[in-house]
Amino acid sequence: MALASRAATASLVSGHGQLPDHGEQACPDGPVTGAGKLTLDVGRLAADAGYGPVPLTRLEFLLLKELAEHDGRLVPRARLLAVVWGFDFDPGSNVVDACVRRVRSKLGFGLIKTVRGEGYQLTARLPQ
């Protein structure tokens, strides 16, 4: 990940980034990124898996962004904890699992694959 991208992600994790909080109006011209048919709209904190934009929380968005940046490769749970939550240790909680569950409920259960005991990855196909 590029240094500027890490700084932006760190800024988002701390809550002081350019992305709006839940109650604020999103900037309609924010950058859009994606992986395959999945698109992520940074300005709106939304994801589209082919059915229209779905609003996400800041943590859900950061989790999905990290998975998308790895382009279908496994992302270890420890990396998700570090990048999304800012933890350099495993807090012994299910914060990652709970966030993945919320993203799946919003965008489809086939979008994120669990690699038991390792981490998560985006699937090659989007949920139908």
Image (cartoon, grey):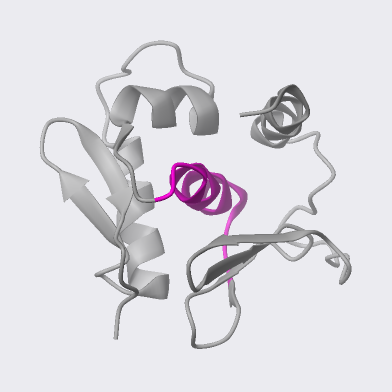
Rendered image quadrant of residue 33:
bottom right
Residue 40 location (% of width, % of height): 62, 63
Q: Give the left or right position of residue 43, taking residue 6 as reference.
A: right
Q: Nearer the viewer, residue 26 or 31?
A: 31
Residue 41 location (% of width, % of height): 69, 64
Q: Give the left or right position of residue 91, taking residue 53 as reference.
A: left
Q: Is residue 57 magenta?
A: yes
In the picture shown, does residue 70 fall above or below 40?
A: above
In the picture shown, does residue 120 fall above or below 86?
A: below
Residue at figure coordinates x 71%, y 33% from the top left: 5
Residue 124 location (% of width, % of height): 31, 64
**Over which residues does the magenta segment extend?**
55-71
Q: Nearer the viewer, residue 126 or 102?
A: 126
Residue at figure coordinates x 22%, y 54% from the top left: 113
Residue 6 location (% of width, % of height): 68, 26
Q: Nearer the viewer, residue 126 or 97?
A: 126
Q: Main secondary structure of the magenta part?
A: helix
